[in-house]
Amino acid sequence: MSQYRLRMAVTLKPEVLDPAGQATQKVVAERGYPGVVSLRIGKLVDLWVDASSAEAAMALAQTLGQDFLANPVLERFEVWVINDED
């Protein structure tokens, strides 16, 4: 078994309203940062898992994302392996 570090980005689906993102975008504009046309807020999850391979670690992370870490009605997620050098 090896230990793998994975990162999951959980974001709202494009069709879901993001009040926190809209409020933050408004503050950004009010503070004088022009050009920000859209801002959405999500969450970042780091996972360290013991698995027999990177593929097995990814499969576990995908299952966790689908079953526990993301709401499939409102959110989508992406998972990738993080190297120790990152």
Image: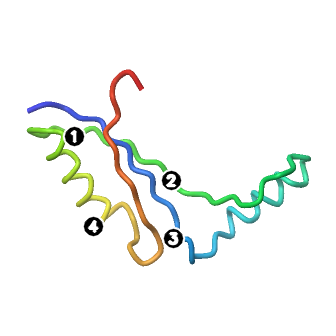
Whichever of callouts 4 and 3 sits on the residue coming sooner in the sequence is 3
Q: Amino acid at mark 4?
A: Asp
Is 8 on the left or on the right of 63, as rendered?
Answer: right
Considering the numbered disc 1 on the image, is that residue within a helix, a strand or a loop?
A: strand
Q: What residue is disc 3 on?
A: 13
Q: CA distance from mark 2 to mark 3?
A: 13 Å
Q: Residue, x 40% and y 71% (percent of image)? A: 71
Considering the numbered disc 2 on the image, is that residue within a helix, a strand or a loop?
A: strand
Is 2 on the left or on the right of 86, as rendered?
Answer: left
The dot on residue 43 is 2
Q: CA distance from mark 1 to mark 2?
A: 19 Å
Q: Amino acid at mark 1?
A: Val
Q: What residue is disc 4 on?
A: 67
Q: CA distance from mark 1 to mark 4?
A: 17 Å
Q: Residue, x 68% and y 62% (percent of image)? A: 21
Q: What residue is disc 1 on?
A: 49
- Classed neighbour count for the residue bearing mark 1: other residues with Cα under 10 Å, few (<14), some (14–19), many (≥20): some
- Tell me, what colour scheme is on the image? rainbow
